[in-house]
Amino acid sequence: MTALLEFKQKIKGIYAQYEMYLLPLLKFVLALIYFIWINTNMGYMTALDNIFVVLILSLICCILPSGMMIFAGFALMVGHCYALGIEVAAFLLILILFMMILFLRFSSGKNIVLVFTPLAFAFDIPVLLPIGCGLLSSAVSALPAAGGVIIYYFVRTVRIQSQALLGMDSDIVGKLTLLSDSLMKNGEMWLTLIAFIAVVLAVNLIRTRMFDYAWRIAIVAGGVIYIVIMLAGSMSLGISISVFSLIIYTVVAVLVGIILEFFVFGGDYTRTERLEYEDDDYYYYVKAVPKALVATSERSIKKINGESAREERKSAERVVNYSTPLFQGEEPPKKKKRVQETEAASVVQKADIDDIDFEKKLEESLKDL
């Protein structure tokens, strides 16, 4: 467990250090996968079904707000639908406008969920999306999740009915009727939409409660609710669903949700504290759940070379030692000896000067003159 906590802290530290570069990179990867999914499932317009177009759009989306990714995806879908007929493109535009007016405008900060929803279906783990929304977002994210379900089933309907739509070139009413019936009478779409909304609301409700291990209970409860709704709905509506695949993929989604909880929340409920405060107006009852952290050792490397060693030696030689005789009122031995030698030399010089007979020297110098 300690190793996992250290790994978690390292991952968070790396992301915090390089967030300025990692966030655009992640947006680029997400946009690239989303646009490739659109072209793979539609791809009716050759000009748009091009990897260079996808790369350019992904680069644009990585430097702009996430809403640009949603509108770029809508533009790709409308372009491919236009290749099948202007009626199909108009139907999709009306559907998008209807979703934006009805509920997407209430969840502007959460609409990126609309991009993740088709990708969750593409990876065969659709229940992971409502569980993740309930854990990481608010209950409002159920609205874009529902919109993503509608978009996914519309794309699937167009892919299935593409040959029929191409065969009705001049039958405008027939195309619109085919598209509307394929969506409105699609029991699987409505069942999935209800399951998504129920799971998002249930997971978010349980996750925000005060009891211990609320996140993990919410994850498991979300998986169970999804399985129950899908099984009950399939039996009541007569929809054929693979029970084995449903259970397996739901278990995988629950495991991924637990991993997500470890990295995002990771509370240590064994050290939970319940505190009470009060002021002049209120009483405060606080439940404090500490984060599961581990102290990581930081290593510092000191570089030692010849130059630094010599500098340290020189600085050590310049250090003053206050215990020397100089600071104790005594003279150093060498200095004493030097002073004694100087005094002896001056005495000898004085003695030599005293031995000189100046009168005799003066008489000799006068005789020479």
Image (cartoon, helix red, strand yellow):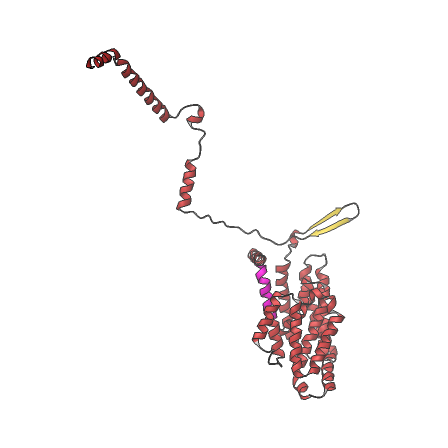
Which segment did they paint magenta?
Answer: 18-31
Q: Residue furthest front?
A: 369
Residue at 74% over, 47% down:
277
Q: Quadrant of the N terminus?
A: bottom right
Residues 210 and 345: in front is 345
Could you say where residue 23 lies in the image, as x and y percent from the top left? 60, 63
Could you say where residue 255 lies in the image, as x and y percent from the top left? 62, 65
Give the quadrant of residue 4.
bottom right
Residue at 44% over, 23% down:
329
Residues 240 and 363: in front is 363
Q: Residue furthest left?
A: 368
Give the quadrant of residue 56.
bottom right
Q: Residue furthest right?
A: 281
Residue 138 magenta: no
Residue 316 in the image: above or below residue 142: above
Residue at 55% over, 52% down:
296
